[in-house]
Image (cartoon, rainbow, N blue to C red):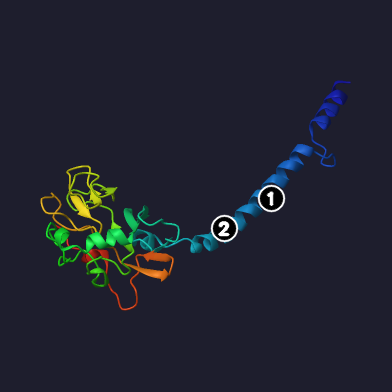
């Protein structure tokens, strides 16, 4: 009796391969699916990775295109390029008229933009390709603060023609980004390389045909 019971017990302890095990079957399906997905990912990843910009392109700052059609006259927008703020201003005819006044030029440190703070195509009285649109690197040339836009004449003093005021140490720039005499900042605000991709789009980081300006050419103190 004893031996018969033991034989039956041993026999019952051995799993019957012919009996369906739902949990075991589910596990096998999950593992097979995971392996297939892993293989697909290994194939797909290089394709996705190739669509991303190269790390050296990102570090150097790939050009960006900005739609300027919605900037109202007299307004400024700020965009980022090369981890720096870029100011884009839609100047009004009144702003441009003030810029051209000889009385303002007399108060500027570098009114003719002789210091290389801009491309050759922006080394003019408006410091721009098209006078209505100004593009500047929005970093004070004193200690790197971001100047505040103060376009209204007289908004920070009776003789103020409009421009930028640095909140850190009081450096002042006119509506072409030219620094005023008496400011701690030694240089005009830089103009980055840029071009008009269309009548309503500015591409920062790319020169117009014939231009070869780079940010590394900007003079620093």
**Would you identify the image quadrant in which residue 208 lies?**
bottom left
Tally the marks: 2
Q: Residue at x 41, y 56 (%)?
A: 71
Q: Nearer the viewer, residue 41 or 54?
A: 54
**Would you identify the image quadrant in which residue 221 lies?**
bottom left
What percent of the width, then of the height, locates residue 217?
21, 66
Mark 1 or mark 2, which is nearer the start of the sequence? 1
- The crowding category of the residue bearing disc 2, from other C-alpha atoms within 10 Å (few below 14, some 14 to 19, many at least 20), is few
Q: Residue at x 71, y 42 (%)?
A: 27
What percent of the width, then of the height, locates residue 6?
82, 25
Residue wearing tag 2: 42
Q: Is residue 139 left or right of residue 37?
A: left
Q: Is residue 150 left or right of residue 25?
A: left
What percent of the width, then of the height, locates residue 97?
26, 62
What percent of the width, then of the height, locates residue 62?
38, 63
Q: Work out which quarter of the rendered image holds the N terminus and state it.
A: top right
Q: CA distance from mark 2 to mark 1?
A: 16 Å
Q: Nearer the viewer, residue 89 or 8?
A: 89
Secondary structure category for the residue under label 1:
helix
């Amino acid at each position: 009796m004893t031996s018969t019971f033991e034989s039956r017990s041993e026999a019952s302890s051995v799993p019957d391969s012919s009996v369906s095990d739902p949990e075991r079957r589910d596990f096998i399906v999950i593992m097979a699916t995971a392996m297939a997905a892993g293989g697909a990912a290994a194939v797909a990843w290089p394709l996705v990775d190739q669509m991303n910009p190269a790390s050296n392109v990102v570090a150097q700052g790939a050009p960006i295109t900005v739609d300027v059609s919605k900037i109202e006259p007299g307004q400024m927008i700020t965009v980022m390029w090369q981890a720096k703020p870029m100011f884009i201003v839609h100047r009004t005819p009144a702003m441009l008229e003030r810029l051209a006044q000889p009385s303002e030029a007399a108060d500027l440190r570098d009114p003719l933009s002789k210091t290389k703070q801009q491309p050759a195509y922006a080394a003019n009285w408006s410091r721009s390709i098209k006078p209505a649109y100004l593009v500047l690197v929005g970093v004070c040339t004193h200690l790197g603060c971001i100047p505040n836009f103060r376009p209204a004449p007289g908004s920070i003093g009776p003789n103020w023609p409009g421009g930028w005021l640095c909140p850190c140490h009081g450096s002042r720039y006119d509506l072409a980004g030219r620094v005023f005499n008496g400011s701690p900042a030694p240089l005009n605000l830089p103009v980055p390389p840029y071009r008009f991709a269309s009548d309503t789009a500015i591409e920062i980081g790319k020169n117009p045909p014939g231009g070869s300006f780079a940010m590394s050419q900007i003079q620093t103190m």
